[in-house]
């Protein structure tokens, strides 16, 4: 009696389960469950971060300090917490407590809803999708989808948007803000990407997963002289910390630690034969790595009580003794250096990458410390130098050649003067492809976008961080609205969100909160609701009418590109902006022939005539 799936020959709109639940009900129910699971993942991560902030403030987690006091004070302001005459620890304690209370809040509105544009908040209130508390929305979603509760596809799908908002405008946003306060708000760092970053003569330790607390400690202890000396005693020249998946994005953005890649690269890290240890915590960790590791010397080390794995070593993380735990993992890796036996294989090439574009830095780079704003970006869009903005986010999945759609779309958008922001494994894909350097603007970008990137000195594809950092995209689009000239709501902006190679329930939660925030969102690969035209109609038409955003699953990359550009141009028309004209700005690069050169010289010296 459930949870049901209607598949195979019965997968027709009129099919029902034994209880009478129709196919659209079952499809909507399962979709809501997935969105709730994705929201739970991001938000439980956020809860751990909030407790780390609390214990850093009270001194119970002495290895953690408050690194970004400005951001802490700003956040206190948003939370209506007084800062006058108080120490940063005192403020941080109240900030952490207030955020922790948001998880269990039963009534009212989660506090960060007020960060959205006013018009957006009204839309949410009108349709009753303002989340009350993070846990309440997740629990209610699980209840509604239990056998015999919510039997109406439309009602179930509306609930999916509400629970997703508890992710984007609460859980994920809490996590991003707290992580910045504890470990520093990212600013651009130069580093490298690809499996080629593994070093033959050093102890390679891969940090993989999502929560950055223990990885931050690994960054610190891997630079301690005692640890480096211990590694030398064991015959290694040094310690090479390597990131994987979203933990990689966190330590890349803040410390320039190189990234080995995204979700589908994890087994490859083992297969290099060079990984002494892969330290994991939660989310997107394949059990297969422990099985692959049996053929090599690699130790897979689980560190979260929530995420244990057969055939892995477990070293429990404890924020009260965080550095001690990090040293324990590192020593295990160093001791394992001498055990390399089976020869692995790998590529040796790496790509340069500039990562670390927090929304604060994006604002700063457009006007410096005293005139930071989004004005130049909005003006460039209004003028048509930049056609629009696209977020390419989300995972890889084994049904698609890894990174192929991420890379294809990123390249084509940039060529078409569309600024790209990227997070998660999408960002890892672009980093490995070598797209995240300012030089990319010169090599690939359309002339208008190239001009803007050259003026500011940034890549045309900006690395905004990990999966929870999709909340930074919400802040960026909100700031664009506030800056003026591009309508008065997120749904007016020429922006589109894309998850071309998605696989995780977290990606569905992200997609839904972008839609509820007013964006057109396209997912590649396969649709989890393909069998139900009614549910697809809700996602495409009803959501667009009510919320100004819609969700569409499009497997063909060329079609994703076409529909995105059409949507951007459609929004430009509605805003009555200048029609985008390719090549209108800047100078098209062109190979000069000798005849061209002579013409130019003659134009410069008209009195001499052409010889
Ligand atoms: S790691 S959720 S595979 S983006 Fe955040 Fe990558 Fe998707 Fe996991």
Image (cartoon, grey):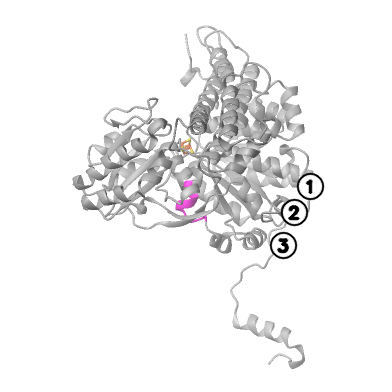
Q: Earlier in the sequence, mark 1 or mark 2?
A: 2
Residue 299's x, y, as percent? Answer: 27, 38
Which of the two discs, 2 and 3, sits closer to the camera? 2
Q: CA distance from mark 1 to mark 3?
A: 21 Å
Span of residues in magenta? 428-436
Disc 1 and disc 2 in contact, CB within 8 angstroms: yes
327 shown above or below 445: above
Between 148 and 104, the one lying in front of the other is 104
Q: Would you say 526 lies left or right of 214 here?
A: right
Between 516 and 4, the one lying in front of the other is 516
Which of the two discs, 1 and 3, sits closer to the camera? 1
Residue 15 location, quadrant: top right
Residue 240's x, y, as percent? Answer: 34, 50
Q: Would you say 545 lies left or right of 331 here?
A: right
63 shown above or below 163: below
Q: Look at mark 1 in the image and give the residue it sits on.
A: 485
Residue 13's x, y, as percent? Answer: 58, 18
On whether residue 430 falls in the magenta region, the answer is: yes
Residue at x 58% of width, y 37% of height: 88
Between 9 and 390, the one lying in front of the other is 390
- Circle 2: element type: helix
């Amino acid at each position: 009696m459930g949870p049901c799936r209607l598949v195979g020959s019965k997968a027709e709109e009129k099919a029902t389960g034994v209880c009478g639940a129709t196919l659209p009900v079952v499809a909507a129910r399962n979709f809501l469950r997935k969105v709730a699971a994705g929201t739970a993942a991001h938000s439980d991560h956020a809860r751990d971060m909030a407790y780390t902030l609390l214990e850093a403030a009270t001194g119970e987690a002495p290895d953690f300090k408050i690194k970004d006091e400005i951001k802490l004070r700003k956040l206190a302001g948003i939370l209506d917490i007084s800062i006058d005459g108080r120490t940063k620890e005192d403020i941080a304690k109240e900030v952490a407590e207030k955020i922790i209370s948001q998880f269990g809040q039963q009534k009212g509105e989660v506090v960060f809803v007020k960060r959205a544009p006013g018009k957006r908040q009204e839309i949410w209130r009108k349709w009753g999708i303002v989340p009350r508390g993070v846990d309440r929305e997740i629990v209610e979603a699980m209840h509604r989808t239990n056998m015999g509760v919510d039997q109406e596809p439309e009602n179930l799908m509306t609930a999916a948007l509400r629970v997703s908002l508890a992710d984007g405008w609460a859980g994920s946003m809490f996590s991003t803000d707290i992580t910045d306060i504890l470990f520093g708000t990212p600013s651009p760092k130069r580093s490298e990407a690809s499996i080629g970053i593994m070093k033959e003569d050093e102890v390679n330790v891969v940090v993989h997963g999502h929560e950055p607390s223990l990885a931050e400690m690994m960054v610190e202890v891997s630079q301690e002289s005692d640890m480096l000396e211990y590694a030398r005693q064991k015959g290694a020249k040094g310690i090479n910390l390597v990131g994987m998946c979203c933990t990689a994005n966190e330590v890349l953005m803040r410390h320039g630690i190189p990234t080995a890649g995204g979700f589908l690269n994890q087994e490859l890290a083992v297969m290099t034969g060079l990984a002494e240890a892969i330290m994991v915590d939660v989310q997107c960790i394949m059990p297969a790595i422990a099985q692959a590791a049996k053929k090599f010397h690699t130790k897979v080390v689980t560190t979260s009580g929530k995420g244990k794995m057969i055939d892995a070593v477990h070293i429990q993380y404890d924020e009260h003794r965080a550095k001690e735990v990090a040293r324990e993992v590192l020593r295990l890796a160093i001791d394992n250096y001498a055990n390399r036996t089976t020869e692995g294989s790998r590529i040796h090439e790496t790509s340069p990458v500039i990562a670390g574009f927090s929304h604060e830095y994006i604002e700063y780079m457009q006007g410096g410390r005293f005139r930071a704003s989004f004005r130049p970006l909005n003006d460039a869009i209004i003028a048509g130098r930049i056609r629009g903005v696209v977020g390419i986010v989300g995972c890889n999945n084994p049904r698609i050649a890894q990174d192929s759609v991420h890379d294809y779309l990123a390249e084509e958008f940039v060529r078409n003067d569309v600024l790209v922001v990227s997070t998660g494994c999408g960002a890892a894909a672009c980093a490995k492809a070598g797209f995240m350097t300012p030089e990319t603007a010169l090599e690939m970008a359309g002339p208008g976008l190239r001009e803007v990137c050259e003026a500011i000195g940034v890549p045309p594809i900006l690395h905004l961080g990990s999966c929870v950092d999709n909340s930074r995209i919400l802040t960026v689009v909100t700031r664009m609205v506030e800056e003026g000239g591009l309508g008065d709501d997120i749904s007016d902006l020429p922006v589109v969100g894309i998850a071309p190679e998605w696989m995780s329930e977290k990606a569905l939660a992200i997609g839904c909160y972008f839609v509820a925030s007013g964006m057109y969102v396209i997912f590649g690969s396969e649709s989890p609701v393909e069998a139900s035209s009614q549910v697809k109609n809700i996602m495409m038409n009803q959501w667009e009418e009510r919320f100004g955003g819609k969700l569409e699953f499009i497997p063909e990359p060329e079609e994703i590109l076409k529909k995105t550009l059409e949507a951007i141009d459609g929004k430009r028309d509605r805003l009555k902006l200048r029609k985008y004209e390719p090549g209108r700005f800047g100078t098209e690069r062109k190979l000069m022939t000798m005849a061209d050169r002579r013409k130019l010289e003659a134009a410069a010296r008209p009195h001499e005539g052409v010889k």
